[in-house]
Image: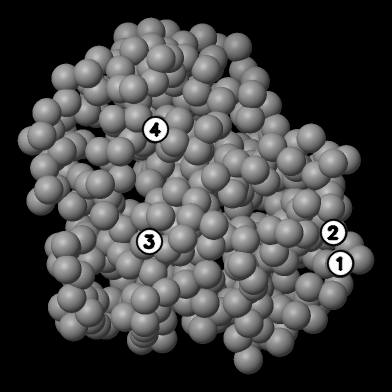
Amino acid sequence: MRVIGIIAEFNPFHNGHAYLIKKAREIVNDPRAIVMPVMSGFYTQRGLPAICPPDVRARQALMCGADLVIELPFSFSCAPSSRFAEGAVSELVSTGVVTDIAFGVDTDDIELLKKLADTGFEDNESFNNKLNELLSTGMSFPQARAAALKEFAASENITGDIDSAVSSPNSILALDYLLALKKIDKKNRINVIMIRREGEGYHSSELNGDLVSATSIRQAVSSTAPHFSQSAIATKLNGHMPDLSLGVMLSAASSGKFRFPDYVDYIRSAILTANASASLDSIAYMSDDLSGYIKNFASDIRPDTISDSDHDLKTFESKISTKRYTLSRIQRALASMMAGQDASYLEIKRPPYIRVLGFNSEGKYCLKIMGKCSKIPVINRPSDCLELQSDNESLKKIFELDMRAAAIGWNLYGKDIASEWESIPVIVK
């Protein structure tokens, strides 16, 4: 049985995701290969709740080519690329059934990414000295890492399009996936499939052609706020998402299963919570004096700091982000504060359980095999964790954190904050 693991957010599921699934099956030459995405839950890597709840995004994926969707816990989904990658790769490998892992890249030179990963640069003294030197100048971590890696590659006589390999978001993640696989899959049992990203760039806000970015889709939805007209969204996104995916999202919203999130209200709540907190120093990602910076920003907040019309948070970004503190880092720190994640959670390096979000008939068959092969517990609903957490402190901490993040998410989606206790896997016939 061929099982292709895919790491994704599906925020929301668009044509590029459908292309990745289709292309992965073509590359392994098995149209019946099972595709198993590990998907971010309520929060995404950039530090904000997803545009749709996990069950809606899981159904989108299952209707558009996936067979079995599992969840990446909050502590790993709302995290820097290295932690995000290691958590996701670890969860896929822990299933005991994944034979391949597929992901997109922004470069044609996939061999270059492999060469960089093989150097073991993360443990190289000269690389780390250069990285720390650049960080001390106030450069953000992503920029400092890219610059240090570029210099390191030159010292190792590695040539190629280094800039795209170390600077573009998908390729940064791809490099971290490769590094994670080196740590986790030491016997090289997992086949790696790197697929060239097609269409608009990762951060592009343009709705041009069939293959557009998730960023542009989210901005199109935000542009219809605060009323989020279903017809306006359908008109803007027609052809830019698979029909089934768009239909799932709009149907769920129109039937009251969720409402599109008001990010202005969310960010205001986060900033006001930060202002009311006695100290932020122990919160995850608040190091390097970020806690002091956020407290100072929060103390000066005024009604127009985050305006009602700033639905895509662009004005907020221009006011709060700096060369040293990127918006994603700030938002991840605020998310950690809201969910109650202190720095001790980051000592848990890999997900301690697998949460099933949905499956079809092929996925159901795969689940039966996973039940025998998985290296960590597989759960279908939150109550399953209650029986396990007494014997596993890491599982207890990550589970409780997930439930707190879910409460924030459901509140933002206009539902009871305890809704997650009633969640069961999506089943698609």
Q: Are marks 1 and 3 in contact (CB under 8 Å)?
A: no
At 65% from the left edge and 43% from the top edge, which residue is drawn? 400
Q: Secondary structure at mark 3?
A: loop
- For the question of whether residue 212 can be seen, the reply is yes
Q: Amino acid at mark 4?
A: Leu
x, y percent for residue 296: 25, 15
Depth check, mark 4 against mark 1: the one in front is: 4
Q: Are marks 2 and 1 in contact (CB under 8 Å)?
A: yes
> Which quadrant of the structure image shows residue 30?
bottom right
x, y percent for residue 92: 71, 56
Q: Are marks 4 and 3 in contact (CB under 8 Å)?
A: no
Marks 1/3: CA distance?
Answer: 32 Å
Q: Amino acid at mark 2?
A: Ser
Judged left or right of residue 210, residue 135 is right
- For the question of whether residue 33 can be seen, the reply is no
State how the image is colored. Answer: one colour
Marks 2/4: CA distance?
Answer: 33 Å
Badge 1 density bin: few <14, some 14–19, many ≥20, Cα 10 Å: some
Q: Which residue is the site of mark 4?
A: 334
Depth check, mark 2 against mark 4: the one in front is: 4
Badge 3 density bin: few <14, some 14–19, many ≥20, Cα 10 Å: many
Q: Which residue is the site of mark 1?
A: 371
